[in-house]
Image (tube, grey):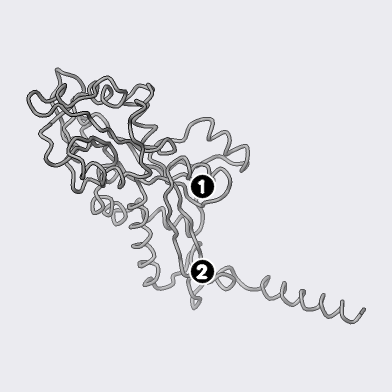
């Protein structure tokens, strides 16, 4: 029995010695980065992940703090991107369940306090793109524009019929679609458009922006809202700050000039300053190459 225990101890000493002497790139030939959160951002995050993994796979090893030594193999980088909503991503970050949280809204102070209390460090906020909250209608809907007050009244139930908006078109009930309450887009819309009033009880909630777009594209008498990159099969309405203002389209020029009234930044949140391959990935996302992908997907790059 004594010999058996000595053999076991000797085996584990050899294992510890081997891995202790090996460098980090010898220990781990595969680096997995997890990204979780905003459904609005999921298509952008997936595209960034795909392009970055291709880039790393074809890169030659270089000498540097975050690179392998000459002659060593750089680890394979695998980036896993999932949605679920900004609230889901923030909860995962607080609980240590993701490397990066994608959020279409800023973290709240109570969320930041919950994070620092649990993780014993400060959360790091990094803007990565710009979005315009867009108002969707069916492509055959004759409506062209709405004021912010009209949008609010539709989603709080004060305007319920299309005849109240378009004279002589249709005496039909407005079918309004919204995101679920764990969505950053939902919270942004409620705070900035509804002025924190409640949505009407008959507003239908759907689990993602793609689902809202799909529903509106199939229903002539519907309306919805969401990120600009999902606008396929529907039409965007122009938006006016008030009755006296000009109606403005959600174009890059109008967003950058701040004449379009409902635009926002999109964020990465991390547990402290990014390190290693996560830092390399974020630096690439913020580079000209990474920001160009914002335009290709349908969002707007940072200025």
* Residue drawn at x 16%, y 18% as measured from the top left: 243
Give the label, 2 or 1, closer to the camera.
2
Quadrant location of the N terminus in the rendered image: bottom right
Q: How many marks?
A: 2
Sequence order check, earlier mark of 2 and 1: 2
Q: Position of residue 49 (x, y in %)?
A: 38, 59
Residue 34 tag number = none
Q: Quick one: SS at disc 1?
A: loop
Q: Is residue 49 left or right of residue 76?
A: left
Give neighbour class at mark 1: few <14, some 14-19, many 20+ (Cα, 10 Å).
few
Going by the picture, which residue comes out furthest to the right? 2
* Residue drawn at x 21%, y 23% as measured from the top left: 241
Of 193 and 175, which appears nearest the observer? 175
User: Is 89 situated above or below 78?
Assistant: above
* Residue drawn at x 81%, y 77% as measured from the top left: 8
Residue identifier under label 2: 30
Q: On the image, which quarter does residue 251 sit in?
A: top left
Q: Position of residue 199 (x, y in %)?
A: 36, 26
* Residue drawn at x 41%, y 42% as measured from the top left: 103
Residue identifier under label 1: 273
Q: Position of residue 11 (x, y in %)?
A: 77, 78
Q: On the image, which quarter does residue 121 sit in?
A: top right
Give neighbour class at mark 2: few <14, some 14-19, many 20+ (Cα, 10 Å).
few
Of 200 and 299, which appears nearest the observer? 200
Of 132 and 214, which appears nearest the observer? 214
Q: Find the distance from the CA under tag 2 to the CA under tag 1.
A: 22 Å
User: Is 268 situated above or below 255?
Assistant: below
Q: Position of residue 282 (x, y in %)?
A: 41, 53
Question: Are discs 2 and 1 less than 8 Å apart at CB?
Answer: no
User: Is 105 situated above or below 13?
Assistant: above
Quadrant location of the C terminus in the rendered image: top left
Q: Quick one: SS at disc 2?
A: strand
């Amino acid at each position: 029995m004594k010999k058996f225990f000595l053999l076991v101890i000797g085996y584990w000493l050899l294992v510890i010695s081997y891995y202790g002497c090996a460098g980090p790139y010898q220990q781990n030939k595969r680096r997995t980065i997890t990204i979780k959160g905003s459904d609005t951002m999921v298509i952008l995050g997936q595209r960034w992940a795909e392009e970055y993994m291709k880039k790393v796979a074809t890169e030659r090893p270089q000498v540097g703090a975050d690179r392998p030594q000459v002659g060593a193999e750089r680890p394979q980088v695998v980036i896993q991107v999932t949605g679920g909503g900004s609230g889901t991503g923030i909860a995962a970050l607080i609980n240590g369940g993701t490397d990066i949280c994608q959020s279409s809204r800023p973290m709240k102070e109570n969320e930041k306090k919950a994070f620092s209390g649990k993780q014993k460090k400060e959360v790091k906020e990094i803007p990565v793109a710009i979005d315009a909250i867009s108002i969707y209608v069916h492509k055959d809907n004759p409506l062209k524009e709405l004021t912010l007050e009209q949008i609010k009244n539709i989603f709080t139930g004060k305007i319920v019929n299309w005849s109240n908006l378009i004279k002589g078109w249709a005496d039909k009930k407005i079918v309004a679609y919204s995101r679920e309450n764990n969505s950053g887009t939902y919270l942004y819309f409620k705070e900035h458009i509804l002025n924190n009033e409640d949505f009407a009880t008959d507003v239908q909630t759907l689990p993602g922006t793609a689902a809202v777009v799909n529903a509106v594209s199939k229903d002539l008498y519907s309306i919805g809202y969401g990120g600009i990159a999902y606008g396929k099969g529907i039409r965007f309405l122009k938006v006016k700050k008030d009755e006296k203002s000009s109606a403005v389209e959600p174009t890059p020029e109008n967003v950058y000039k701040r004449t379009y009234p409902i635009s926002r930044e999109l964020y990465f949140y991390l547990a402290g300053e990014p390190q290693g391959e996560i830092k390399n990935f974020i630096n690439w996302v913020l580079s000209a190459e990474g920001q160009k992908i914002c335009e290709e997907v349908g969002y707007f790059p940072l200025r």
